Amino acid sequence: MDGYQKSEIEQSLTTELFSPLPKSRQLFTYLMNAIALGLTVVALIPLLSILWEIIARGISGLKLEMFVNPVIDFGFGNAILGTATIVTIAAILSVPVGILTGIFLAEFGRTHPVANFVRFITNILTGVPSIIVGVFAYGVIVLVTKKFSAIAGGFALATIMLPVIVLTTEEALKLVPIDQRLASAALGGTRFQTTFRIVVTTAIPGITTGILLAVARAAGETAPLIFTALFSLNWSTGLLSPTASLPVLIFNLYNDPDPEKHQLVWTTSIVLLGLVLCVSIISRLVTRKMKIK
């Protein structure tokens, strides 16, 4: 094939690539885009209506003193502190176990039967209803200690957070290029050194994102805390005593006929929504940082 024929073929391909689509294809593309946009708007309507309802009803009752007053004084300070305490306990219990399990699944036992079994159980746990987790924590902690407590609530939330952390850690480690592992091995690094000094360090943004998403989910759970931490109208006296939380506060007072308590429910909803939103934004920022790197 001479140079003239090659030039003709290249020119033909270029013309075909850059020629406009037929009218029928353009019409189909515009129609699909319009349908997708319309369905997106329909999906956003319930979400935006919920946000509008919460903000419209709750913003009028929001006062600074509510952040330091307990529920008995028409505040939610003890509920914020209780939520933070329970989620912190849950993170202490679930984060180390979840990260180490994810490392095992991704690096040391990818095709091992034990790893396949652990991965299967983890996938099942992600779909277990939270109320079942609450009943489980009630039987394991509350019946043994004979007390509703923040520790029991933290254990229940840790059970919910654990599979999320395990799966996101595994996926984050799998995204690390194999070239980095080979380079570390070529420089004399052992498998342990390669995993914890190279692979885990590279995957830290993804692992952090998974942890923050698990925290955001746990912070809004209600059913497990009803069976474990219960509720308190005043400040908690310790980790082994009933502890208030924002979701349970909303659940307990929503049907109360007292207008002031009903207003407190809507105001608490704004605070809980804001906390979850902040955690979600932080996870997005971490993910963006990972993509930039």
Image: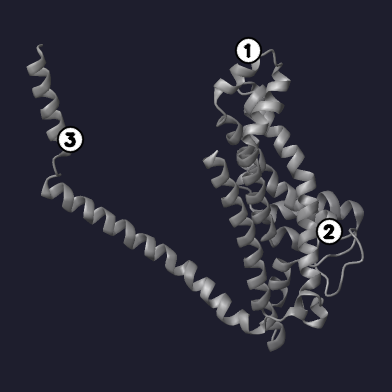
For marks 2 and 3, the one nearer the N-term is: 3
For marks 2 and 1, the one nearer the N-term is: 2
Residue behind mark 2: 150
Q: How far apart are marks 2 and 3 (CA)?
A: 64 Å
Residue behind mark 3: 17
Give the residue displayed 68% in from the left and 25% down from the top. 195
Find residue 182 and report its horizontal and vertical position in percent.
Answer: 59, 17
Secondary structure found at label 1: helix
Instruction: Name the residue type under label 3.
Output: Leu
Secondary structure found at label 2: helix
Location of the C terminus (image quadrant): top right
Secondary structure found at label 3: helix
Give the residue displayed 81% in from the left and 59% down from the top. 85
Give the residue displayed 8% in from the left and 18% down from the top. 5
State the residue in front, 245 or 117: 245
| Nearer to us: label 2 or label 3 | 3
Q: Distance between the residues labelled 2 and 1?
A: 49 Å
The disc at residue 81 is none
Location of the N terminus (image quadrant): top left
Residue behind mark 1: 186
Find residue 174 and report its horizontal and vertical position in percent.
Answer: 57, 30
Give the residue displayed 57% in from the left and 29% down from the top. 176
